[in-house]
Structure formats: C-alpha cells, structure tokens
Image: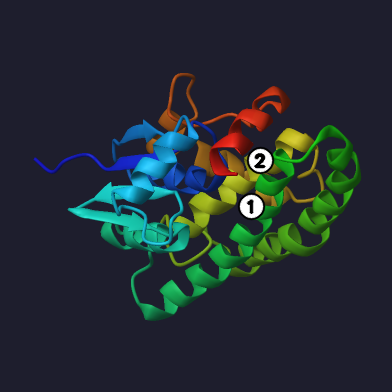
Amino acid sequence: MAAKPVLHYINERGRMEPIRWLLAAAGVEFDECFVKTKDDLTKLRKDGFLLFQQVPMVEIDGMKMVQTRAILNYIAGKYNLYGKDLKERALIDTYVEGLLDLNELIMDYDYLSADQKKQQLAPILDKATNRYFPVFEKVLKDHGRDFLVGDRFSRADVHLFETLLMAEEYKPDILASFPLLQSFKARISNIPTIKKFLQPGSQRKPAPKEEDLQRIMTIFH
C-alpha cells in the first residue's frame, strides 16, 4: 500500500489549501506536518528539502515536491483530474491559471491588517464579479455541460468551487447575478469526495484570524 502524501505547511490555508482541496476531491487521504515555528522552517531548509527555500512542500511517491503549481499539476495528472487529451488539458490550465490569480488576491487579503482590509476588499470583489465570474458563467452557458471542460470532473471544477466558497465568505450574495455558477456550486457540493471535505472535522482550513497574523508572520520573516 502506497504511503499517504504528507503536506508540510503552516496550519492555515495559504498556498497549501488548493492542494488540500485537490487531494480531497481525488479521494486521497493525506497527513499534515505543520510548520509551527521559524525553527521548523529553518530545519526543513537545512535538511535540503526545500528546493527554493519555501513551503508548501509535499512528500508524494518518493518525491519532496515544491512549488504550488507543480504540485497541483502532478496531483491532477496522477488522479485523472486533468482532462482526456492535450486540448482539454490546455483549457483546464487556462481556467486554473485565472482562478489561481483570483485565489491569490483573496489569500493575500486574509493576511492584511484590519485597516488594509477596509481598503482592499472592494477592489477584490469588483474583480471577482466583473472580471472572473462572468468568464465562468459564460463558459458554463456555452459548454452546456455539468463541468467546465469535457464531460467529466476536473481540477478546474475543484479550483472554481473552492474560489466561489472563499468569495462568499466575504460577500454572501456575490453569486446573485450568476445563476449558472450557483447551479454549478450546488452540483459540485454533492460530489461525494467534495461533500466529505465540506463536513466539520475535515482537513479544510478556515480563514486566518487577525490575532494569528503576527504568529504566522514570525514564521516566515
């Protein structure tokens, strides 16, 4: 029996959360080794496990993988979440890259101070509702299928679903003008592996609390 993947990161969302989501969507159990202090991070660096001196790092199939996109690509390919051919993969990559851009805006927002958040929330929500979500509403309309690409569940669906949930945390009615995205969200939430990850007690992480920000910063800086 193959060993479970082991995820090395802080006990927060950050850049590891899309990886957690993709593994969970694939039905893959994983363990987590949390970086709790600056010393923990320094040890990983000194042991030579971090190619570019950064986490996330995922131990999988005998490798110690770094770089979020590389890890996501590997997981998607390994667990058949990357389309049926090269054209579908290119389309999935296009959608995912856009989603990760928006995901990073939201992720960065989580680590701002209270004053900075007041200034930055409106521009982020504006980009979500006027640049990103209309694209995926149109994709669903034009494609006319349950999923973004082809006829089967892919990493693009996982990343879109995760991003929709994150956006709703900051504006619960953000999907009011996007009926197809609402339907998409309902469909994906009923996929058994997704449904399981949404349950309390899963390895899904909540948004960071303001009181945790200083502790997180001392690990990385």
When asked about the image quadrant of residue 25, the answer is top left
User: Mark 2 sits on what residue?
Assistant: 166
State whether residue 19 is above or below residue 169: below
State whether residue 11 is above or below residue 150: above
Compare residues 30 and 91 and report the one nearer the observer.
Answer: 30
Where in the figure is residue 200, as x and y percent of width and height?
A: 49, 19
Q: Residue at x 63, y 45 (%)?
A: 183
Looking at the image, residue 77 sits to the left or right of residue 118; the answer is left
Where in the figure is residue 110, as x and y percent of width and height?
A: 70, 39
Q: Residues within 10 Å of mark 2 (few under 14, many from 20)?
A: some
CB contact under 8 Å: marks 1 and 2: yes
Is label 2 in a helix, a strand or a loop?
helix
* CA–CA distance in space, label 1 to label 2: 8 Å
Amino acid residing under circle 2: Met
Q: Residue at x 84, y 33 (%)?
A: 114
Where in the figure is residue 169, as x and y percent of width and height?
A: 72, 34
Q: Residue at x 70, y 23 (%)?
A: 211
Amino acid residing under circle 1: Asn
When asked about the image quadrant of residue 109, the answer is top right
What is the quadrant of the C terminus in the image?
Answer: top right
Q: Residue furthest left?
A: 1
Q: Residue furthest top?
A: 201
Q: Residues within 10 Å of mark 1 (few under 14, many from 20)?
A: many
When asked about the image quadrant of residue 155, the answer is bottom left
Mark 1 or mark 2, earlier in chain: 1
State whether residue 145 is above or below residue 207: below
Is label 1 in a helix, a strand or a loop?
helix
Compare residues 151 and 49 and report the one nearer the observer.
Answer: 49
Q: Which mark, by number, is residue 103?
A: 1
In the rendered image, is residue 197 in sight?
yes
What is the quadrant of the N terminus in the image?
Answer: top left
